Image: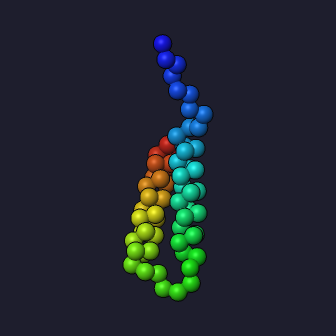
Amino acid sequence: MNKPIQNSASWSDTLKTRQAHLNALLKTINAGPGKASPIQMLTISAIKSEMAHIDSQLNRRK
């Protein structure tokens, strides 16, 4: 019989870690001086959208 996988991190901890990772990526992308390229703008928009989704999931779990 197989033992069930034990997950040491809760779902909220996973979401918080993911959010911190996305925040670090956002800071890295925004670090460059000058005007952002269209691809950078799309990437920034996608990261912000994902962070908003994570925020809503975390708020729902409270």
> With respect to residue 10, does 46 lie above or below?
below
Q: How many marks?
A: 0
Residue at the far bottom: name it.
Answer: 34
Residue 17 lies, with reference to residue 30, above or below; the image says: above
Q: Position of residue 25 (x, y in %)?
A: 54, 64
Q: Residue at x 60, y 34 (%)?
A: 8
The image quarter containing residue 40 is bottom left
**Which residue ends up furthest to the top in the rendered image?**
1
Q: Residue at x 53, y 52 (%)?
A: 18
Q: Quadrant of residue 39?
A: bottom left
Compared to 43, does 35 lie above or below?
below
Residue shown at 58% from the left, 50% from the top: 17
Residue drawn at 58 percent across, 63 percent down: 24
- In the rendered image of this protein, does residue 3 appear above or below residue 39? above
Residue 42 appears in which quarter of the rendering?
bottom left
| Residue 37 locus on image (x, y percent) | 43, 80
Residue 34 horizontal/vertical position (percent): 53, 86
Q: Residue furthest front?
A: 1
The colour scheme used here is rainbow
